Image (cartoon, rainbow, N blue to C red):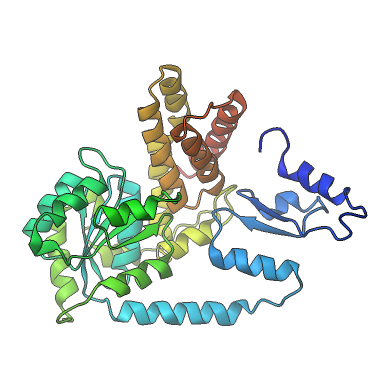
Amino acid sequence: MPEMDGIETAKRIREYKNAFMPQLPRIIMMTAFSKEYFLKYNNLDAFLTKPVTQATLFDSIKTVFGKQVAKTPRSLQKQADMNADINTLRGARLLLVEDNVINQQVAQETIESEGLAVLIANNGKRAVTMVTARDFDAVLMDIQMPEMDGYEATRSIRENPQYSQLPIIAMTAHAMSGDKEKCLAAGMNDYITKPIEVDRLFATLKKWVKLKKPERSRTTVYKAVCKKDTPSKNQFENSETFKTKTPFSDSDDLPGIDIADALERLAGNRQLYFELLRDFHKEYHDVANLVLTLLDKGDIEKALHRIHAIKGVAANLSINHLYQISQTLEMMLGAGEEITPELLKQFEAVVAEVMETLAGLN
């Protein structure tokens, strides 16, 4: 944080105890760094790695107050609930509306690995056309896209009474107050935030998707149709062969990257994950220079678009520190706040660190 960072703040709080504060508060560090980085400091009671979920926040608060956290039973129950949701959804046909290729592949792998079928639209305009041409059980709608954004696409779909009951679920990296209300006002049914939380995704789909007549062959048939409509990079020509190849031998410990979290999102597809990391490096290795150039030119809109893109991809790939700094930049620019040179230097440094790490995978 500017002016005083979290370590110094915690230190001063610890030194403050007096008659007016006889008992000091517990201090939980929320950071995109790994907790090992902070073990040398004794002013902290617990650590949370960003992005923070409701479950990990709740467990950490219980822990610092001496409550036992039954993680295994909760994890097993969570998995059991998700499996129950998935069983009612197998064979469902979804339209994924997303303009970023890497995010497309993350979402597609998450969904198709559980027996649902996915077709992809690269923007809102294409989504409107595809809805009228095919029969979908639900639409997963990104918000910020070129040509036509998610709000306008949803309104356009709802203009046709035939699609008044089609479930449209927002899937976006935005999580600001009022965003859900805007989605609902545009005609969407619900709202899922990025990065994808797999159990929440399927719980939301179960809430809205009602299959009239599930058929065992439905998904297989529909995948064949999907390959004709979706760019080849978003559909694997032989998905079963792809998934059963020998996993990459890449390290399980990459600085600033939570591999385990990302693999959970990708149904454990390790080979795909490292391919996506390589794609990310190729696509965004010069993003810091590009953003700084756009800001120097005063082109805030294009700078925001690039920052939003890298934030969403970093979140889905669990590149947590880059996700956090990109989110901060996006929020400040979007609110019209002045961006300090220190924050831009931090953004540059984080991008450079991530890209240096990923360069070793090539």
Residue 83 shown left or right of residue 62 in the figure: left
Residue furthest to the front in view is 20
Tally of numbered discs: 0
Instruction: Compare residues 32 and 188 and report the one nearer the observer.
Output: 188
Residue 134 in picture, x, y percent from top left: 9, 61
- Image-quadrant location for residue 165: bottom left
Residue furthest to the top in view is 297
Residue 237 in picture, x, y percent from top left: 21, 58
Residue 126 visible in the snapshot: yes
Which residue is drawn at the image coordinates 73% and 37% (left, top)?
4
Residue 111 in picture, x, y percent from top left: 31, 66
For residue 227, above or below residue 322: below
Q: Quadrant of the C terminus?
A: top left
For residue 71, above or below residue 145: below
Instruction: Compare residues 285 and 16 and report the one nearer the observer.
Output: 16
- Image-quadrant location for residue 272: bottom left
Residue 61 shown left or right of residue 286 in the figure: right
Q: Quadrant of the N terminus?
A: top right
Which residue is drawn at the image coordinates 48% and 77% (left, top)?
78
Instruction: Compare residues 158 and 326 and report the one nearer the observer.
Output: 158
Which residue is drawn at the image coordinates 60% and 47% (left, top)?
255
Residue 228 visible in the snapshot: no
Instruction: Compare residues 27 and 287 and report the one nearer the observer.
Output: 27
- Image-quadrant location for residue 243: bottom left
